[in-house]
Amino acid sequence: MTAGRDWRADPEAGQYTDPFWDALEADRFLLHRCRDCEETFFPPAPVCPRCGRTDVAWVEADGRGRLVSFTRQHVAPPGFEAPLALGVVELVEGPRLLAGLPGDAAPSLDATVELTAVEYDADYDRRDRSGRPFFAARIVE
Ligand SMILES: [Zn+2]
């Protein structure tokens, strides 16, 4: 019998993404930028999604963006409390990413958000990233 798929986040640990996770612990958010075509992208990847070249470098993001979509789940997965708000954030640098929207503030489209490092409950299994922060988007206006 095959075990069910574990849908919880499982960030890959390893040398390649360590700079991202180390910066997040200092509440800084890093992105990758291609040195050839200047595409800025997330998640970090060794190959530029625009031109396919491999000359990519870490750059520090402003950390701010706007909320382009969101949903509120009233049945939360294990390790989270309902209701759980999640949104798609478009960073000022261009990349879009999915992030939790912690707090009681009601999200609205085009709201300005700021990425922030957050701690989750210990029972949220992040394997070798346990005890280290993850990121979420805080609504600022
Ligand atoms: Zn490129």
Image (cartoon, helix red, strand yellow):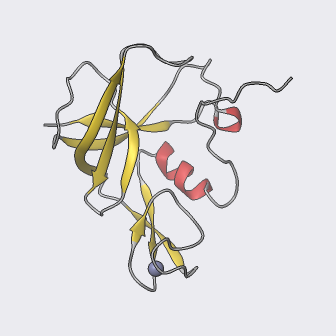
Q: Quadrant of the N terminus?
A: top right
x, y percentage for residue 38? 38, 79
- Asked whether 3 or 101 is in front, the reply is 3
x, y percentage for residue 40? 39, 69
Looking at the image, the residue that sits furthest to the left is 141
| 69 to the left or right of 74 | left
> In which quadrant of the rendered view does residue 138 lie?
top left
Q: Residue at x 55, y 50 (%)?
A: 22
Q: Residue at x 32, y 29 (%)?
A: 71
In the displayed structure, would residue 2 be above or below residue 35? above
x, y percentage for residue 46? 60, 69
- Asked whether 129 or 80 is in front, the reply is 80
> In which quadrant of the rendered view does residue 54 lie?
bottom right
| 2 to the left or right of 141 | right
Q: Quadrant of the C terminus?
A: top left
x, y percentage for residue 137? 32, 38
- Asked whether 109 or 28 is in front, the reply is 109
